[in-house]
Image: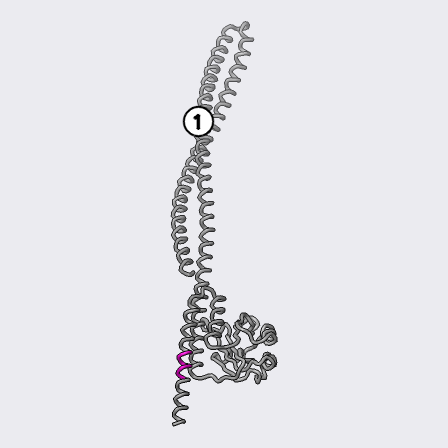
Amino acid sequence: LLNNARKAAVGMAALQETLEDRQAVTTVVGQIAEATTEERALRVALDTVRTAFGWAYGSFWGLDEQDQLLRFVQESGSAGEEFRAVTLAASFAEGVGLSGRAWRQQDLVFVTDIGEMTDCVRAPAAQRAGVKSGVCFPLVVGGKIIGTMDFFVTETVELSESRAAALRNVQQLVSQRLDVLRRGAEAARNARDLLETIARLREASGDAGLVAEQAAEQATTMTREVEELGEASAAVDEVIRIISGIADQTNLLALNATIEAARAGELGKGFAVVASEVKDLARETAAATKKVSDQIAGIQASSRSVADGIHTTAETIGKLDVVQSRIAEVLEEQGRMATALEDVAH
């Protein structure tokens, strides 16, 4: 009868521990789900696990990927100043100490008395501080270990199957939450990067639009100036035609004067000399006006060619302006999408 009573008591104690473990896991789930940053999630996990399972001290060790060492990051509770000082200064390679063993085995590791661990730098301080049993589990995100969490008590305890299963559940829950937070943080970073890129593209698009507008204005001004040059050339050409006509008339008069001078004989010799000079001047004037007329014709042809080129350029600028407007619309849509993505990530 006494034996049965003992068995019943043990069974009740085991049942009570199982219920407490389940409640502890539920508490951890509720608390860690509210964490919005990785640092906060680790803090909540340390505090909640330590309190819910009755540990005296807990700490998180992050993996230094470059040096391949576990280094202290956060703590919860207290196990004495000496133990804390040693903890803050310590680091663990894979397989070394309680944290290093959990890292290597990629599973929960429990020790009845940490003071008996010969490869742990915290063992001597643990003995002096009265720290006894400890447990450690790795945190895995994206298939890679990112660190470990360990917890200690100042008494010797045994880790039941129920407690071990509960702690493994906590390990998975914390790892999953950290994974979600990291992916959310990465999505937020990507969204911010996208927004910054869009902002730069918008600025560049605006600058390009401004340049296109200025180019269009310059093209319009140049077209107007070329047209004015064409008009001025036409006016000069008209003057040249008038001068050419006068030169022709002068040449005809000089010819008539020469004929009359010849008829006058000796009396018309002086008049003949003057008439000859007038005729030479008329020929030179005609030659000069023809040369200027040819040059004016060349200027007018070039002006028409330049005007056509400027018109074509202006049309191209107009098409570019349409493209810029479409690009601006696309950037605006991408900006709205990136903002929505950033809001979701948070």
Q: Is residue 330 on the magenta stretch?
A: no
Q: Quadrant of the N terminus?
A: bottom left
Q: Is residue 277 left or right of residue 312?
A: right
Question: Is 117 drawn above or below residue 259 in the view shown?
Answer: below
Principal secondary structure, stretch drawn in magenta: helix
Q: Which residue is mark 1?
A: 231
Q: In front: 110, or 199?
A: 110
At label 1, the amino acid type is Glu
- Disc 1 is placed on an element classified as helix
Q: Quadrant of the C terminus?
A: bottom left
Rendered residue at 40%/48% (across/down)? 328
Q: Is residue 330 visible?
A: yes
Q: In front: 172, or 53?
A: 53
Disc 1: CA contacts within 10 A as few (<14), some (14-19) or many (>=20): few
Question: Is 62 drawn above or below residue 244 in the view shown?
Answer: below
Rendered residue at 47%/83% (across/down)? 159
Q: Is residue 16 on the magenta stretch?
A: yes
Q: Residue 237: name its quadrant.
A: top left
Q: Is residue 90 visible?
A: no
Q: In front: 210, or 35?
A: 35
Q: Residue 183: name its quadrant.
A: bottom left
Rendered residue at 40%/49% (across/down)? 327
Q: Which residues are magenta?
A: 14-20
